[in-house]
Image: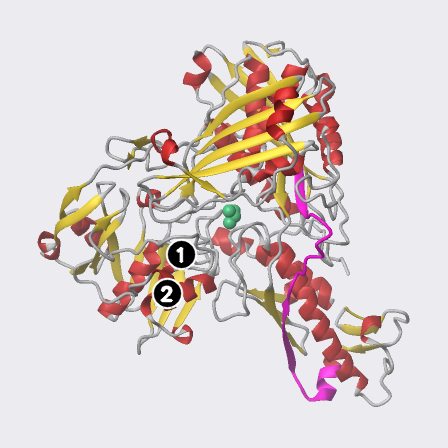
């Protein structure tokens, strides 16, 4: 059943993407389309005393300026604004009232016959504020941070074990706020379909989430709001929750009774969610032989004043390594900013960074090779739950990664390796992520001519979902890849949660198998209804679909063509829709792992760090498509370079305003920053996690990369930089 599964397959949507045939949210057209531009607040906290749109309204082509004073009705209770993945708290409501909760908050929407007109007119909206004191600095807010419940139970007495340890490491690590910069901006085109019905083309990771959300806010019926997002230009968590522009676009379409497009500028995208800044304190206590006796992980992360977004940053530390004791503490600090949000590898990109830097520092203190220390603390069980893994081949990641990298040639002494005028450093880190899966529904429609349509309301956020769905369906139905059409990104299709957490590949693939089983059974019934059927008496479990035939597995000569079975049954197509659940057996932990080896070259005179080589060895169950999987991991590694060396949202705390809200001054890795990246997938057969043994790959690629680089910088320079990003000023002193 694996002609396509496991085969390097080019993206089935690749041609559409590179030729421009793939259409994104801001590219849909509609007759009589109005264009909108958002006006945002310039203060971080306070109230709007007066908002004057009169100059903007005088500009030719301006249709309307919507503010909290003249907008149409919206729901007035918190519940209505809770999307499927909303955290605790009171969700932000754009244009709701005169309160200012963060700088960059939308406060008016200018609608015009052309986007340039709207944008110019937006610059003429005058606002007077009653300003109040704000806090945007985590170091000022940390004393007021409040404690969160950590789901992992502590084990043993970590404080006592730490105090009694032969060798101790105790340090604080800092990661700044980072903002999402997907290629596709946040955008919505709302088509007014008449009679109050809307089609919403939105940049989102979850069309049905947006549909529920819009229905809640505007009291609309689901059948009157269709949300579409067939292509997404990168999202990485930024599209898990609906963004405010979709509310503004629907609000305006209802006010004008015409189609409306709202596109945020790159600068305005900094007024939405971000990776929370994090202050982490890690304490490790070990015996002289490297046995870990104590791990404590204390963290402070940040959110807005109105919602409590957080993940479980500290718990990775207790899970990964064998340690007799572990303890965690997590506090949340409120800032006058938008609510923080998920961003690729949320909680692990930051939490595992600190742990993996700390392990490296402990290895130095123990005078042990950092790979050897990790092997001595290796655990075949989830240390928190005590459960064995459904599969864990991290040991092989270490082995194959080290071999490919040449780790055994490492001189352990810092500053000992050079290449001409540059210092060379080699670092290692471990990555870990969850293998999650979610209930999902899939419909398969199979035609007598051997064509199949697979549909599900999931997204393809650039990860390759279209392609892996087609591969799995082709194998399940025994058809060639080009006989499969995939439909997704449409709220009218069978139920799917948001695409995030690396859970869709496993979920939708196994979902296709479930629905494929139902299709096969129906075909068998049809085939057995033929008088003198060659597969009479064959049980459903003994039949397979191959080459357009229904075939008895045990005797391949007993077969009926799908076309004949349908023709005899008087149907030209059959359709099945099934929901797949993933019950947890409660007896296993499900995780993916990686070992990352990094080489940096540092020019000490200039303070410049180049990441010249990375080997990432990944154990993530069955790899559906080595080609798209490789891209996922490579993208994560590139982003890890950004986390380590470049990404940092800089806030002027006097104004409570982001200073580098653009991709000229907010740095991300560009081609010149990316050198040799090698991705290795180690074999990891998993018969427990789900029938296909798939674990998901979206997030694991980034986790640990920044630590491997930071550890390599230490090895090159002898300088331990504990606050990211590692910029040249930090290397000079
Ligand atoms: Mo995931 S945080 O949606 O990349």
State the mark number for residue 605. none
Residue 171, x across and y down, in percent: 52, 22
On the picture, is 278 further left or further right than 304? right
Determine whether 669 is above or below 60 in the image: above
Label 2, secondary structure: give it.
Answer: helix
Tell me the quarter of the picture where residue 598 sits. top right
Query: Observer-nearest residue: 390 or 271?
Result: 390
Residue found 49% across the figure and 11% down from its top:
604
Q: Secondary structure at mark 1?
A: loop
Q: Identify the mark nearer the N-term, 2 or 1.
A: 2
Residues at marks 2 and 1 touching, judged by CB atoms closer than 8 Å: yes
Q: Position of residue 654 (x, y in %)?
A: 24, 30
**Label 2 CA crowd tier, 10 Å (few <14, some 14–19, many 20+):** many
Q: Is 655 located above or below residue 554 in the figure?
A: above
Whether residue 137 can be seen here: yes
Q: Is residue 206 left or right of residue 380?
A: left
**Range of the magenta residues?**
565-594
Would you say residue 575 sits in the magenta stretch? yes
The disc placed on residue 214 is 2
- The picture places residue 358, in percent across and down from the top left corner, at 58, 25
Q: Residue at x 70, y 74 (%)?
A: 518
Residue beneath the point at 34% across and 30% down? 140
The residue carrying mark 1 is: 242
């Amino acid at each position: 059943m694996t002609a396509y599964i496991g085969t390097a397959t080019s993206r089935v949507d690749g041609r559409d993407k590179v030729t421009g045939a793939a259409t994104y949210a801001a590219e849909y057209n509609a007759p009589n389309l109005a264009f909108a531009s958002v006006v945002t607040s310039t203060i971080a906290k306070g109230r709007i005393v007066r908002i004057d749109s009169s100059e903007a309204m005088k500009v030719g082509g301006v249709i309307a300026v919507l503010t909290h004073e003249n907008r149409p009705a919206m729901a007035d209770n918190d519940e209505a604004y809770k999307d499927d993945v909303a955290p605790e708290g009171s969700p932000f409501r754009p244009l709701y009232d005169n309160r200012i909760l963060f700088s960059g908050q939308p406060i008016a929407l200018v609608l015009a016959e052309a986007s340039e007109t709207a944008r110019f007119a937006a610059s003429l909206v005058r606002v007077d504020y009653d300003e109040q004191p704000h806090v945007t600095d985590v170091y000022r807010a940390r004393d007021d941070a409040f404690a969160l419940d950590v789901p992992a139970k502590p084990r043993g007495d970590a404080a006592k074990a730490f105090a009694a340890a032969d060798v101790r490491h105790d340090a604080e690590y800092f990661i700044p706020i980072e903002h999402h910069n997907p290629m596709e901006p946040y955008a919505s085109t709302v088509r007014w379909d008449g009679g109050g019905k809307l089609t919403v083309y939105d940049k989102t990771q979850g069309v049905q989430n947006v549909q529920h959300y819009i229905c809640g806010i505007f009291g609309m019926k689901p059948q009157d709001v269709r949300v579409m997002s067939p292509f997404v230009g990168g999202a990485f968590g930024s599209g898990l929750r609906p963004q405010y522009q979709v509310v503004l676009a629907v609000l305006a379409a209802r006010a004008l009774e015409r189609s409306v497009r709202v596109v945020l500028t790159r600068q305005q995208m900094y007024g939405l969610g971000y990776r929370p800044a994090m202050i982490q304190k890690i304490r490790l206590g070990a015996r002289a032989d490297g046995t870990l006796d104590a791990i404590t992980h204390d963290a402070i992360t940040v959110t807005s004043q109105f919602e409590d977004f957080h993940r479980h940053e500290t718990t990775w530390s207790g899970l990964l390594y064998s340690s007799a004791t572990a303890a965690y503490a997590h506090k949340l600090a409120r800032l006058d900013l938008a609510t923080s949000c998920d961003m690729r590898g949320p909680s692990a990109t930051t939490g595992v960074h600190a742990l993996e830097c700390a392990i490296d520092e402990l290895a130095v203190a123990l005078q042990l090779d950092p790979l050897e220390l990790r092997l001595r603390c290796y655990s075949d069980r989830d240390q928190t739950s005590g459960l064995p893994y459904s599969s864990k081949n991290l040991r092989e990641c270490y082995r194959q990664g080290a071999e490919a990298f040449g780790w055994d040639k490492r001189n352990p002494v810092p500053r000992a390796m050079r290449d001409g005028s540059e210092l060379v450093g080699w670092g290692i880190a471990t990555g870990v992520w969850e293998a999650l899966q979610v209930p999902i529904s899939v419909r398969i429609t199979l035609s007598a001519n051997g064509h199949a349509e697979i549909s599900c309301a999931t997204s393809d956020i650039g990860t390759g979902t279209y392609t892996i769905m087609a591969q799995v369906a082709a194998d399940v139905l025994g058809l060639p890849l080009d006989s499969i059409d995939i439909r997704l990104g449409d709220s009218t299709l069978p139920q799917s949660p948001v695409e995030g957490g690396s859970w869709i590949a496993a979920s939708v693939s196994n979902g296709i198998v479930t629905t494929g089983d139902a299709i096969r059974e129906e075909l068998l019934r049809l085939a057995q209804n033929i008088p003198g059927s060659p597969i009479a008496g064959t049980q459903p479990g003994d039949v397979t679909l191959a080459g357009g035939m229904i075939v008895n597995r045990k005797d391949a000569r007993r077969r009926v063509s799908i076309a004949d079975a349908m023709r005899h049954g008087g149907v030209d197509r059959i359709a099945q829709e099934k929901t797949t659940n993933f019950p947890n057996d409660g007896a296993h932990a499900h995780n993916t792992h990686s070992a990352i080896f990094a080489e940096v070259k540092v020019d000490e005179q200039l303070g410049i760090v180049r990441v010249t080589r990375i080997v990432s060895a990944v154990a993530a169950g069955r790899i559906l498509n080595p080609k798209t999987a490789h891209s996922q991991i490579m993208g994560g590694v590139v982003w890890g370079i950004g986390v380590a060396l470049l990404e940092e949202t800089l806030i002027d705390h006097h104004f409570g305003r982001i200073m580098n809200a653009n991709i000229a001054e907010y740095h991300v890795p560009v081609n010149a920053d990316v050198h040799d990246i090698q991705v290795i997938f180690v074999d990891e057969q998993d018969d427990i996690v789900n029938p296909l043994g798939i674990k998901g790959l979206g997030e694991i690629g980034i986790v640990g990369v920044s630590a491997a680089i930071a550890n390599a910088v230490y090895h090159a320079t002898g300088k331990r930089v504990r606050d990211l990003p590692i910029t040249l000023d930090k290397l000079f002193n």
